[in-house]
Amino acid sequence: MGWIVVAKNELINLLISMNLPKGSYSIGSDKNESLCFIHDGFLWVVFYSERGQKTEPEYFSNEEEACDVFLSRLKKMLHIK
């Protein structure tokens, strides 16, 4: 199903409606062993937090693009089509 997410709040609502495991992601904070979505004050950052390290970070100036990438990575990580 094609989702269009334009803001963090919409992303949160979508994740809740999809009933995804809450331990697999974190929005707004760095949580170990999770896919994270944060705003660092300048850019949106999507990364996997592993042992306190940001793994495969991607940086975005556009919130919509960051939301789309986060959702795509999360679905891939959880093997959801």
Image: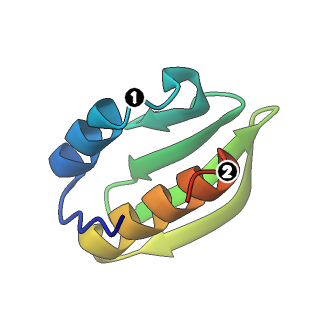
Callout 1: 10 Å neighbours few (<14), some, many (20+)? Answer: few
Q: Nearer the viewer, residue 45 or 65?
A: 65
Query: Where is residue 18 drawn, in percent x and y?
Result: 36, 37
Residue 43 appears in the picture as rendered: no
Query: Where is residue 53 drawn, in percent x and y?
Result: 76, 43
| Quadrant of the image occupied by residue 28 | top left
Q: Give the position of the C terminus as an image quadrant.
A: bottom right
Q: Is residue 38 left or right of residue 31?
A: left
User: What is the number of the mark on residue 79?
Assistant: 2
User: What is the number of the mark on residue 38?
Assistant: none
Callout 2: 10 Å neighbours few (<14), some, many (20+)? Answer: few
Q: Amino acid at mark 1?
A: Asn
Instruction: Give the SS element for disc 1.
Output: loop
Q: Is residue 62 left or right of residue 49?
A: left
Color encoding of the figure? rainbow
Instruction: Give the SS element for disc 2.
Output: loop
User: What is the number of the mark on residue 19?
Assistant: 1
Q: Is residue 79 left or right of residue 22?
A: right
Q: Is the residue under label 1 in contact with that under label 2 (CB below 8 Å)?
A: no
Q: Amino acid at mark 2?
A: His
For image coordinates 35% across by 62% down, the residue present is: 67
Query: Where is residue 61 drawn, in percent x and y?
Result: 33, 77
For image coordinates 67% across by 50% down, the residue present is: 79
